[in-house]
Image (cartoon, rainbow, N blue to C red):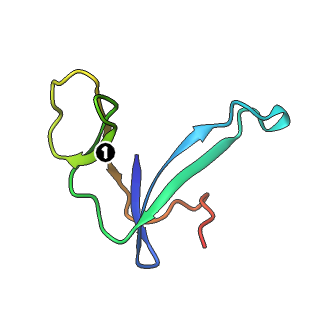
Amino acid sequence: MLYFEHQGKHIYGTLISNHGYYEMYGLPMWIYTESDSPPAGTFLAYKARPKESLEFTNTIDSEPMVVHLPVIKLAEKLEILALE
């Protein structure tokens, strides 16, 4: 997951490939969210069961059913991203 600050906001996102729309198939899509605070760890831990949860952490647990995404801190917004 990419992270950077832009115009006072904290942006978290990833680039994915579009797999479901005819002539747009394969085009990159920027999926992101904005926050008022920086990440509280170097990984985002996603747990699906027994109850879905997300949290930042600095360690990778060996617990099954938890997926860890590294937080890649960028110095600035990538030029290819169009943010307001």
Which SS class for mark 1? strand
* Residue at 34%, 37% in the rendered image: 52
Indicate the position of residue 21 as horizontal and vertical percent values: 78, 35
Q: Is residue 16 above or below residue 31?
A: above
Q: As rendered, which of 59 and 72 lies closer to the eye?
A: 59
Horizontal side of residue 81 vs 42, given as left or right: right
Q: Position of residue 8 (x, y in %)?
A: 41, 78
Extreme residue toward the top, this view: 64
Dot 1 surroundings within 10 Å: few (below 14), some, or many (20 or more)?
A: few
Query: Measured from the top left, where is residue 72 in percent x and y?
Result: 34, 49
Residue farthest right in this picture = 23
Residue at x-position 55% and y-position 50%? 31
**Which residue is depicted at the point 45% across and 64% down?**
34
**Pointer 1: what residue?**
54
Residue at horizontal 39 percent and vertical 57 percent from the top: 3
Q: Amino acid under label 1?
A: Leu
Q: Residue 43 location, x and y as percent?
A: 26, 44
Total numbered badges shown on the rendered structure: 1
Q: Is residue 20 above or below residue 28?
A: above
Query: In the image, is residue 76 above or below residue 14?
Result: below
Q: Quadrant of residue 28?
A: top right
